[in-house]
Amino acid sequence: MAFMGGSSYAMATSLMEGYIIPSPTNLKRLTIEEMRELLFEVEKLLRELRAEIIDPNDFMAIKKRNQKIMKLQSAQNVISNHLQLKIKGRI
């Protein structure tokens, strides 16, 4: 496995926390199946974050949650774009 952190879930949580920056260079060594698995884990974490209920008066918790969602959405975009290029054979 070529996942940073050992598994797709661990890599997705590292992306969410900001420890790993999603870039084509980091995704280059992943196979198509591994990228699909990583994309699935990112989407699962996004659903879990959006389902969290936070007190509307806790601004720091809302800010932290929104930052995690933003990081995961950008990672999702980078992974899906890289995956499409790899499927088409352009990478």
Image (spheres, rainbow, N blue to C red):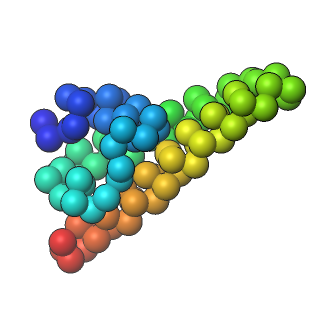
Check the image and report above or below for 83 versus 40.
Answer: below
Q: Residue at x 24, y 54 (%)?
A: 27
Instruction: Establish if 86 lies above or below 64.
Output: below
List the single residue furthest toward the bottom.
Answer: 90
Asked if residue 41 can be seen in this view, the reply is no
Quarter of the image with the C terminus is: bottom left
Where in the figure is residue 43, as x and y percent of width and height?
49, 41
Q: Quadrant of residue 65?
A: top right
Rendered residue at 85%/28% (across/down): 56
Residue sitting nearer the eye, 52 or 40: 52
Q: In the image as oriented, which residue stretches furthest toward the front?
A: 60
Q: How many marks?
A: 0
Residue placed at 41% from the left, 32% from the top?
Answer: 13
Q: Is residue 47 left or right of residue 27?
A: right
Q: Left or right? Give the position of 88 relative to 44.
A: left
Within the image, what quadrant is residue 3 found in?
top left
Residue drawn at 60 percent across, 42 percent down: 67
Given residues 61 and 1, the one toward you in this image is 61
User: Which is more toward the observer, 22 or 33?
Assistant: 22
Q: Quadrant of the N terminus?
A: top left
Residue 45 in picture, x, y percent from top left = 50, 33
User: Does residue 11 show up?
Assistant: yes
Q: Give percent across and percent down for residue 49.
A: 61, 32
* Image coordinates for residue 33, horizontal then vertical, percent: 23, 47
